[in-house]
Amino acid sequence: MEGKPYSTTKLPKIRLQTDLPPLMPTPSQQGVQEWDEVDTEMQNGGLLLQRDEWSPSWKPIASVYNAPRHILSFIGSVFRFSGGPRTMAKMRPTAYLDGLRGFACLIVYFHHHQLFAHWKKGQAELFERGFGYGGNYYAIAFPFIRNFFSGGHFAVSIFFVMSGYVLSLKLLHLIQAGDHIQLGDHVASSLFRRWLRLFIPLFVTLAIYASLLHSFGGITPGDKLLVKQGSWRDEIWNLYCKFKNFSYIFGDGGEPFFTYNSHLWSIPVEMKGSILVYTSLMAFSRCTRNARLWGYVALFVYFMYICDGSYYTFFCAGMLLCDLDLLAEKDELPDWMARLTPYRKWIFYHLFIASLYLGGVPSFNAEINDLRESRGWYLLSLLKPQAVFDPKWFYLFWASLFFVSSIPHLPWLKRFFETSFCQYLGRISFSLYLVHGPILAVVGERLYMLTGWVGDEPEDIMWWADRFPLPGGPLGFELSFLAPHLILLPLTLFVADLVTRGIDTPSVRFAAWLYKQTLGDASNGGNKTKA
């Protein structure tokens, strides 16, 4: 969630002037947590940038003496999101977005585990092919159902739309209020902190992972993309070399996957998408309402139909949804949208169903002919723009746009994302995204081998093969696959919780503190001392 700006000046609340509901419940001053903000009410009771002092300190996260306390705290956090200083007196109207992001992270977790385990037996392709493709009819590939087994791509597209929404929320408040001075201050603060917020936790967690590979006599990872170095020093140097290239978002070509954790390919996209949001809204800040809305459409056409920039259409969708929500709050929606209000329930139920179907687009490869041979996708495949190399992102754009915009109009689904478990997942979502890959490569590899999932593993971990074989079952529901998650899921959530408290939250605070230290006297052109 986009952090709050340095200035503590409160924006005037925009009052509802009409009974017309927005496309999504208007967040107004409530805010939404994104991957660049911690829940300040839960952490320190105030704005991050209102903290006058920050100093680095070392505190053991889980020492021998306090480990039981942290374990009990973790268990309590999972099953309740209320009570004590860690809770909000009243759930924010947009709290469901936090839960959506958390649940989407859980879908990514299971998608990666399904592919990792079933790749060993040559079955991973079945998850990402269409139902009936090649004469294979499995429940895990059936439309709608498949989103729970191979919905990781759909989940990532939702992340991108939510980022566009949340990052633009404060900017659009300021634009619509005509406060261009505060707008500039907020963009400056956000741009300064964004790279630090995304990449500091990434590097620190991977440095710990790289160090663990050379601990306890040496640990062999199951990730074949990662070539373990001969010594700890060589490992850290190799990590640094990989990281500096991976985190340079303006590079052309090269391998998009980070060998230490290939699941993190979306982080540079998040950074570039953030820059797109900030610069686009600055460019549109003095435009009229209609010109601004058409500007989003023009960006979509450019990224989807003119050049292969499909990732960034998701951020444009988030900006558009946010702008429409704020306009609806002031009864300033375009007339043609306002006239659709009586039919909104019917419209959004259909958009929700369409989103679930489109979100299950077959995605084993980028071949359009394979998509056309998939049942139920021939006619849809004809809609794919020529400029888009990987067709799935075209369909996932519409899926994520429809899904995010329809949730507020489906009370039963909105309530699900507001449950304590989804809210907890939302709070640790960034850390969960960071750590689930290394845990899968080290612990998951061995547990899957233990229960019978054996493929072409390194020789020095073959001891684990078939030590406790379990029976199979329907594809995706095998007992031998599900049993390891009795250990893997709690372990992954626990580590993500520790990383959130010990690395992620301090990184956010550090970025905010560092920005504050760079600020000079605004009345003197930013100089701390007068000339």
Image: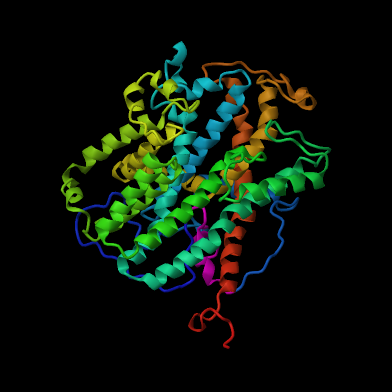
Q: Quadrant of the C terminus?
A: bottom right
Taking 196 as reference, is 497 above or below it? above
Q: Residue at x 44, y 40 (%)?
A: 308
Q: In the picture, residue 60 is in which quadrant?
A: bottom right
Is 234 inside the magenta-drawn segment? Answer: no
Residue furthest toward the bottom? 531
Horizontal side, residue 402 vs residue 151: left or right: left
Q: Position of residue 226 (x, y in %)?
A: 70, 35
Q: What type of secondary structure mainly makes up the magenta span?
A: loop
Above-or-below relation of 308 to 430: above
| Left-right relation of 206 to 342 | right
Asked if residue 461 shows in the view, the reply is: yes
Above or below — where is 390 with respect to 47? Answer: above
Which of the pair 52/332 is nearer the observer?
332
Which color mode does the image show? rainbow
Q: Is residue 48 magenta?
A: yes
Q: Residue furthest toward the top?
A: 135
The answer to whether residue 429 shows anywhere in this view is no
Task: Decide which of 520, 111 is in the foreground and name it.
Answer: 520
x, y percent for residue 357: 36, 29
Q: Nearer the viewer, residue 142 or 59?
A: 142
Task: Write down the region rendered in magenta.
Answer: 32-52
